[in-house]
Every structure is written in C-alpha cells, then in structure tokens.
Amino acid sequence: MARKIKQTLDVSQLFNHALVNPQQQAEIIRSEAWPIIVSAYSVLEGDLLVHRLGNGIVHLTDKKGISVAAIHKMGDVYRFMTADSPLATHDVDSHVYYSTEMISKHPKYIASKLRGQTDLNNKLKRSTGDAIIKLNSVISHMVDQVVDKCAGKSMQSANISLTDAESTYATKIMMGACSVHAIPKHIYEAIQNKYNNYTAGLSKLHDAIDKAKEFYGANKFLYVPAYNGGILLGAISPQPMLAALDRYKVDKLPPAYDGSYSYIDFTMPFQWYPNIESVPDNVRSQLETSLLMFKAHTGLEKVVNGTDRTGNDRVFLDINAYLHGNYNYMDLIMLDQ
C-alpha cells in the first residue's frame, strides 16, 4: 500500500510522473530529503510537486509546474533553495536561478524550520506568487515596447522644457503680469517652436498607441519553450493591456512597472506540459496554428522548439507576436490565440 500524508493523499500524487519514474519516486521517499518535501507540501497546502531530478537537485514546483524551490545535496550537506527566477528555463543540473535559504547537514532540521512560523516558511509561501509578479513586469515592458515599435523609435514622455527666461515670461503671461506682445521676439518664437514640437510628439504618441491597440486586439497565448523539461503555456485577455494603453494616452506614460497595476487577466492559467502533443486538443490546434505562423514569419523555429535561445526582445507587428528573450533567463512568446 502506498504511504499516506495525513491519511488523505497518496504520495504518488506528489510527483510529476512524466519526468520522475517509479524507481526514482521510491528512492526520494526513502531519502533523507523526504521530510523537507513533506514539510514544503504542508506549508504550500498541497500545492507542490517533485517535478524532476538532476545532479543531486530535487526541483519542486507548484501543481501547475512553475518552479518554487529546490533541494540540493552536496556530499553530506543539504541546501534548501527558493526560486528567485521562477519563469527561467532551469537546467536539470543547475541551481543558478535559485536563492539559497538554508544549509544544514540535518535535513530534519530544515524540515522543522519550514513547518514553523519562520522566515524560511514565509519565503517559501511567497515563492508561489513570484512568477506572476515577474510576468506582470515582463508584460508591462512588452506594452511599452510595442508602442515604441509602432512609433518607429523609443517614445519619450511628451513635455515642454523651457529655459529660465522662457519660463519667466510664460509665468508672467499666465499670471496676467504682462501681455504676449511684451515677450521678446526670439523668446516667443522659441516657446512657439517647443509647443509645436510638443503637439507633434503627442500626436505621434497617440497614433502609436492606437496602432498598439490593434496588436492587443485578441486573447494572447503565453508560450515558454524548454521550461522545466517541457513547455509552459497560458493565455491572457487583452483588456488590462488595452486599459494600460488608454492610461498611457492620458498620463503620457505607461502604468508604473512597480506592480501597482496588473496587466494579467488569465483566460487560461499557466500549466506545464511535457510537450505540445500533451496540450488538450481544443487548445493545441490553435497553438500549433499560431506557432506555425510565427515560425514561418520569423524563421525562429529553433527558439520555438527550445533548442536555441535569443538574447533580446523582438516585436512582429505583422502577426501580432512578441518574443521576450534573454540568454540568461528565458524566452517567452506572445501570440494571438
């Protein structure tokens, strides 16, 4: 009979069966790392999987397959780590995207610290939300970059910068202390030229924002290739991005990157799959069509397949697609659903 946790859950449900075979599962259950895993499972209220193994590292994810923590055995020492870049493409034998939280020769000590109301406990709980915080920042950046692409250059906030003399005369006119006719001709012309440039820049910004709205005119797939030994897939509504663009028009700046504005409204929450063939049929047909178009238009088939990486962001207005790339982090592809 399979061992039970609190007599309510078959422990086999704690494993990603696509990447952790029965023999490996049995070895983990018998290992000294098991009490740490059980404690982490309890802290996260069951939202935990032993996702995969590699080079002495046990990679832990939530049930959606998003990285939350890892246990690294080095000789007789155990290192418990939380994921500081949860959407990064994690190599099986690497812990570069994790932050070490505790090191001990006694895994039961780490397990007890996890169960208690400690900093370690709190950091593990916070790790489950870090992926969404990071994703919000990425999409915020995407919205800004699409506007720049539509404008054909990096858009700066539209404003008028006056010299001290120009500002003095402008203030006097506003306060009724002098008339326009009292302004020296060269100062008047300088203010007029700056105002004309301001209105022209504002008009170009508005045109670029309108074009960007066309880019965000449909639900978007979010596709992360080569993620944790498979792929990560989700979909979001365009409404928060369209609302952000409306605010951009009014404020002349996009909503802040500080997380105070949410760009994410999932229509299909993130979920890990071992491959595209494992995606449900009704979604897979849409995804395959979008990816086929992306590959044909961009020539980035190796990036889509996860066998190559890109080091920068690219916007493809013709197909309403965006590639967020970073050699040391991840590739995330946004596509029309």
Image: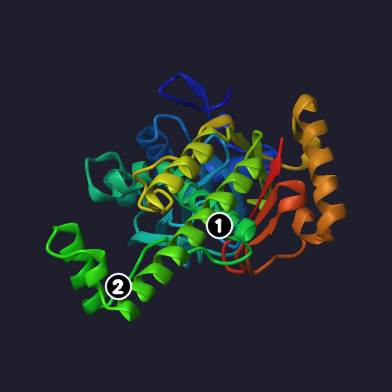
311 or 153, which lies in front?
153
Mark 2 — residue? 162
- Residue 331 at x, y percent in the picture: 64, 57
Give the quadrant of residue 303: bottom right
Q: Is residue 14 above or below residue 185?
A: above
Q: Which quadrant is home to the C terminus?
A: top right
Single out the residue that lies furthest toward the front: 181
- Residue 272 at x, y percent in the picture: 64, 40
Q: Is residue 233 above or below residue 57?
A: above
Residue at x-position 38% and y-position 42%:
261
Residue at x-position 71% and y-position 46%:
320
Q: Is disc 1 placed on a helix, strand or loop? A: helix
Say how the picture is coloured. Answer: rainbow
Type of residue at label 2? Leu
Q: Which quadrant is home to the N terminus?
A: top right
Residue at x-position 51% and y-position 60%:
200
Q: Is disc 2 placed on a helix, strand or loop? A: loop
Q: Is residue 294 left or right of residue 159?
A: right
- Residue 30 at x, y percent in the picture: 52, 43
Q: Earlier in the sequence, mark 2 or mark 1?
A: 2
Type of residue at label 1? Lys
- Residue 73 at x, y percent in the picture: 48, 61
Give the quadrant of residue 181: bottom left
Q: Is residue 88 shown to the viewer in this render?
A: no
Q: Rounded to the nearest whole Å, what is the CA distance between mark 2 and mark 1?
A: 21 Å
Mark 1 — residue? 204
